[in-house]
Each structure stands twice: as C-alpha cells, then as structure tokens.
Amino acid sequence: MKISYHGHSIVQIQTEGKTILIDPFIRGNSLTDLNVEAVNPDVILLTHGHNDHVGDTVEIAKRTGALVVANADLTTYLSWQGVQTHGMNIGGAYQFDFGKVKLTQAFHGSGYATVNNEIVYCGMPTGILFSNEGKTIYHAGDTGLFSDMKLIGERHPIDVAFLPIGDNFTMGAEDAAYAAKLLNAKTVVPIHFNTFPPIKQDPNKFIELLEEQNGKVLQPGEAIEL
C-alpha cells in the first residue's frame, strides 16, 4: 500500500490496483502538486461538506466515474449533481472491493457554500478509518481534540494517522500531539496547515511535541509505503 500527501487535507491511497483520493481540494489549493484534469481515482472519500474538502469532487467523479463515499447527507447532495455515491454514517463500516471504510465522529461543521451564496447542510463531519492489506489508515478530517480518540486507537490499531494541526478551525499542534498520544498510531502525519493565513503553522514544531517521536512531515507528493 502506498499513501501520499498532496497539500491541505488531500491524501491518496493506492492499494491492490485501486486509487482512493481523500478530500480532493485541488483548485484554489496553492500547496497541492495535483492537477484536476490529471487525477484518476477509482474512489473519493470525503470527511465533510466544507468547500476546502469537497473541493473538485464533482468534476473529478463525473470525468472518471469514481464512487464517492461520505456521510449520507453529503452523498445525497452530491448525487443530485450526477455523481455515483455510497452514503454512510458515523459508527458505520462497509466492506468495499477496494477496502473497508468506517466513519468516526469529528467535532467541526459541515456545510457546502454554493455559487448562489447558499449554505447546504451536509450532515455531521467525520473522520475516516480505511483498512486494506492488513493496514489501517486514520484521516481525522477537520476536528477538535476529543477523548474518544483513545477508543478509536484501541479498537482499530492505526498504522498511519493524518491529523489537522492548523488551529483556528481545528486542533492546533498541542492538541493534535495529545490526540496522537490517545490514538497510539505507529506514524503520525500533520495535515490542514499553511493553506490559508489563519492556519499558518510550523509542522516540525508539531513533530517535536510528539512523545513517541513517531511523526513525519510529508511534502506535497511525498509518500509512505506500508
């Protein structure tokens, strides 16, 4: 399994011939190395309905036929845009042919801003547990610190955890470091930082805060092999 980071909260997983793209916010993301016209995912996983996470999902999914998996409210809205979807909800898991997906809780918002300046309610925000090839990846989405992260880590031993560190809208570095302790993941990767002025952070300072010294800063396009 190959897992790569692509700026903001974009994570790509390549496993058994399938490509899974999480939160493909590409246009408007100055930190990404991806191109909307060049990505060809089989599946798109979304953590919540904010524009900087839904991103270019509709365009990509219409072009590639990718299945979009997210909470049921968000997938209902996206299905109205002509996208193939599979709706889930917090605590639920589903075994797909590309791997197992389980949605976890996250503490944040989830509303999509349309071109008509309307906010569409997109259900509860989530984290994502993805498992395949005997490995488990946790993408926390946008969230504050919460104590049940300890339960997530105990119930689902995590190989790589992607945690937001940007502060202001999500956990900052200190809370994310404590989250890493609760999750007890083998490797921790910071996400959701430096894209916009309010979330400017030094990811290396986050790495220094980790008690287990198990952090890794990934540059856009850099990958981890599991």
Image (cartoon, grey):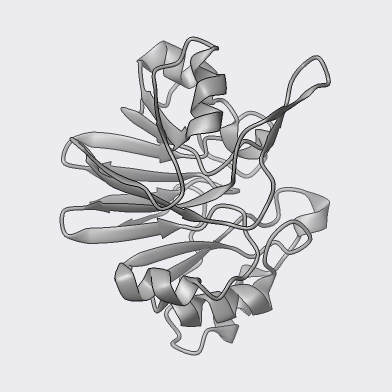
Let me know if residue 68 appears in the view.
Answer: yes
Residue 108 position (above or below residue 205): above
Q: Quadrant of residue 122?
A: top right
The residue at the point 67 percent across, 66 percent down is 171
Q: Number of marks in the image?
A: 0
The residue at the point 36 percent across, 22 percent down is 66
- Extreme bottom residue here? 211
- Say which of 5 and 174 sits in front: 174
Task: Name the side, left or right, on which 175 lies relative to 78.
Answer: right
Task: Name the side, left or right, on which 83 lies relative to 200.
Answer: left
Let me know if residue 37 appears in the view.
Answer: no
- Give how far across and how far down residue 160 sits, in percent: 37, 65
User: Dividing the image into 4 quarters, which one contains the C terminus?
Assistant: bottom left
- Give how far across and how far down residue 207 sits, in percent: 55, 78
The residue at the point 40 percent across, 79 percent down is 184
- Give how far across and how far down residue 30 sits, in percent: 67, 40
Q: Quadrant of residue 206?
A: bottom right
- Say which of 218 and 99 sits in front: 99
The residue at the point 44 percent across, 12 percent down is 62
- Say which of 201 and 56 sits in front: 56
- Give how far across and how far down residue 26 sits, in percent: 58, 32
